[in-house]
Amino acid sequence: MLQGYTYPLSPRGEANLASAPPWHYAGDIVGVEFWTDPAATEATLPEGLTPDPDSDGRAVALFVDWQFSAGHDEYLDPVRSQYREFMVLVDAHWQDEPVSWCPYIYVDNDLALARGWVQGFPKKLGAVHQTRVFAAPGSASPTLTPGGRFGASLSAAGHTLAEATVTLQQPAPDPAALFARPTVNLRHFPSLAAGEYDKPAVHELVMAEFDDRRLADVWTGTGDLGLFAARGEELADLAPVRTGAGFRASMSYSVTDVRRLDA
């Protein structure tokens, strides 16, 4: 019997891209809060979500430098366990609950792409980079102090899609507030049967479950963000009208489950 959690299934079950949960993550985040045309954020929402009446087109762009592990110290294989990611989260409502919706997300690792599709994150391949902090202070690394500066970028298929800079001002007074909204995703797998292309095999709203989430070294400040047009992309339709806070944080959590949302 073939074994595995995702493709490819194989005799020993070791060839699959994403093994079964639990999945554990640790990462450094460079983020920028921004506002765009409310009609643009509304246009990205799937059935079941509605615009947040109080957000006026608010969204957050996140650049993340991740390290992953499952149940066998996978972080000791850094070429597989380390990856970088960019995502946009827009404010929305599920029923009367404020939530975040992820319309676009890019990653540079096929294992992370597979895990994301299982969770409902619409991941595409891209190249993501951000300024790092190192324990030994020096001129090549910013510090987590007022005035510390961070840059980040996203490109895909040879086109620059996003660039950001963040300048730190102070530790966040309430770190959890930056990630207070639960994230809602759409798990979608299409049908290939002729005449049934509009009848997906899987199409369900789910709420991400992040277990044992921890935050550290959360700093806020100012942020700038640009989203740029390219063929085959719609990210630039969310181009900022204005930006708000920038921030830099470290975060860890585990994933073992997802919550299916009723209509």
Image (cartoon, rainbow, N blue to C red):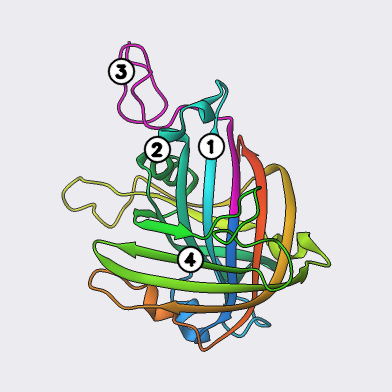
Please give the residue where the numbered disc 3 appears in the rendered image.
10
Nearest to N terminus: mark 2 or mark 4: 2
Which of the pair 210/112 is nearer the observer?
Answer: 112
Asked whether the residues under the numbered discs 3 and 4 touch, taking CB atoms below 8 Å apart as contact, a structural biologist would say: no
Q: Is the Cβ of the residue at disc 2 closer than 8 Å to that at disc 4?
A: no
Kind of residue sitting beneath label 1: Phe
Quarter of the picture holding the N terminus: top left
Residue 162 spot, x, y in % from top left: 41, 71
Q: Nearer the viewer, mark 1 or mark 3?
A: 1
Which amino acid type is marked by label 2? Leu
Which of labels 2 and 4 is toward the front? Answer: 4
* Disc nearest the viewer among 1 and 2: 1
Task: Please give the name of the residue rendered at 71% of the width and 70% of the height, measured from the top-left corner.
Answer: 220
Residue type of the residue flagged with mark 3: Ser
Mark pair 1, 2: CA separation: 10 Å
Task: Give the image location of residue 259, x and y in percent.
Answer: 61, 45
Residue 262 visible in the snapshot: no
118 w.r.t. 62: above or below? above
State which region is magenta: 1-28
The residue pinned by badge 2 equals 111
Mark 1 and 4 residues: CB-CB less than 8 Å, in contact? no
Residue under label 1? 68
Q: Select label 3 or label 4 by which is in front.
A: 4
Question: Label 4's element?
Answer: strand
- Residue at x-position 59% and y-position 72%: 166
Mark earlier in primary sequence (1, 3): 3
Q: Which residue is found at the position 59% from the left and 66% from the top?
A: 31
Give SS at disc 2: helix
Which marked residue is nearer to the observer: mark 1 or mark 4? 4
Can you identify the residue that label 4 sits on?
152
